[in-house]
Image: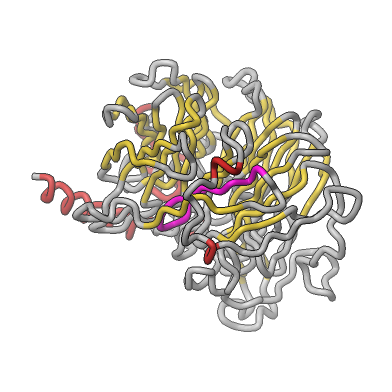
Amino acid sequence: MRRRDFLRTGALAGATALLSAATPTAAHPGPYQPYGRVDVPGTKEAVTSPDGNVAYLATSTGYATVDVSVPDRPELLADVREPLSDHEAGPLRGIYDAKLDATDPETLVVVGPANPLPGAVAGVLVVDVSDPAAPERVAFHETDYPIHNCFARDGLAYLTKNDGETNALAILDLESGETLSEWTLTSVDGAWADVRNGRRSVHDVYVHETTAYLAHWDAGTWILDVSDPANPTRVGGVEVPDPTDLAASSAEGRREGVLPPGNHHYVATDESGSLLGVGKESWAQRIGGNGDGGDGSGARLVGGPSGIDLWDVSDPAAPERLSTIDPPPSPDPTYGGVWTTAHNFEFAGGRLYSSWYRGGVKRHDVSDPRNPEQLSWWRMPDEASFWTARLAKPGAQEGFFVGASRGVGDVPGRLYTFPDHAGQQASPPSLLPEDSTGTESLVVTGTETAADGRTAETDDGASASAPGFGVGAAAGALGLAAWRLRRRARRE
């Protein structure tokens, strides 16, 4: 990859308004803290180039490239907003995910909308990022369903197709735009059709070589052989329940989709493919007393934030749970409170880089996955709500990783750079009230306003009936149905 002077050529004109002042710090000795940061409003997912010089961001209304080759001075290279604005139903909106092709890092895949937006265009934007300062649109493959998350490998895009009916994994050829296959739970057992849609959504997908891992929320994690992309086949699974039992509990109400157990949100493996991390995203609910709209007296909490489970999947048909990394505590672990539940993460070189919303970012030594050891933790809950953590360059002396924050309150989305070494944050902010005994508090902290003006701290901008997505099952199905009808009519 080109050095900074090349990356910056012609890229920063007019962009300085979006740059925050970097905060350079000495790597060591000293307290553990970010090397630098840059403001990029709307930031969601981030990925890094193989050489660690560039970070690519999904920014809700577009995508961006950031030069991180000098980690204490990250600089915005390109900020592309409202792509496909020339489309009759454009621009492409709700962009929460962007991925580099794992085998072709000059190809960036940008997908959206993350949730149903009736009348809006949806699909897969293919971008040439051989010059990160001047990304070029290669193709756009339109879909009739929203795309919350994706993975790209070998010229293929693996897409979450939550259409309100089948909740499929769709595999699409990036060159031709042809959908090679769609795989669903109901292809394994028709009883899955009786499970409420929101509890069997395919929230995310990760592909290691020829194996795909699907985080299917309360339906667990499913492991597929995708060596023939036209014919995926199941080879195993993690915490996959009986669909009849899940359908029965679904009838009890939507609360069960917010609370643990279940809630498989994000999955990834280490480089060997034998160690699997399953991140679970969950919350608590207050029951009893006058906790609903009152002061919480007499109420009790059920559920709470979830962590990351580590599994040995060397035999995908017989996975073994090795350990669990617990989430940070929260002063209000409800859906409308302060989120510290697990979000996205990455394994690299025996380390786990993880994000916990307002609980911050962490590094763990997982070389012995039965006994993960926390090496560093940084949080600033009044300004940062982390969406992901990704290694850029390894090494205690020169290495660093990036953390993408969607922002809190008036603080916009940001990309931070952090040292890749162990350390302690100086005077770290407490995540619990001063009078707390260390247990989760019943103190209601109120409704916060996100950087884009939304109320309540939500993953995707809507109600708690929609864990991980922000769209209730019934409303989502109706919106999708109307959306498909309008799009079909327009195409015809």
> Which residue is more in the foreground, 177 or 130?
130
Residue 61 drawn in magenta: yes
Q: Position of residue 240 (x, y in %)?
A: 53, 34
Find the residue positioned furthest to the bottom: 294
Relative to 459, residue 246 above or below? above
Residue under the image location 28 percent in, 56 percent down: 85
Residue 134 drawn in magenta: no
Residue under the image location 33 percent in, 27 percent down: 173
Q: Which residues are magenta?
A: 57-69
> Which residue is more in the foreground, 102 or 112?
102
Q: Position of residue 336 (x, y in %)?
A: 56, 69
Residue under the image location 32 percent in, 36 percent down: 138
Q: Position of residue 186 (x, y in %)?
A: 36, 33
Q: Where, by quadrant of the figure, is residue 392 drawn?
A: top right
Residue 222: in sight, yes or no?
Answer: no
What secondary structure do most residues of the magenta stretch adopt? strand
Relative to 136, residue 427 above or below? below
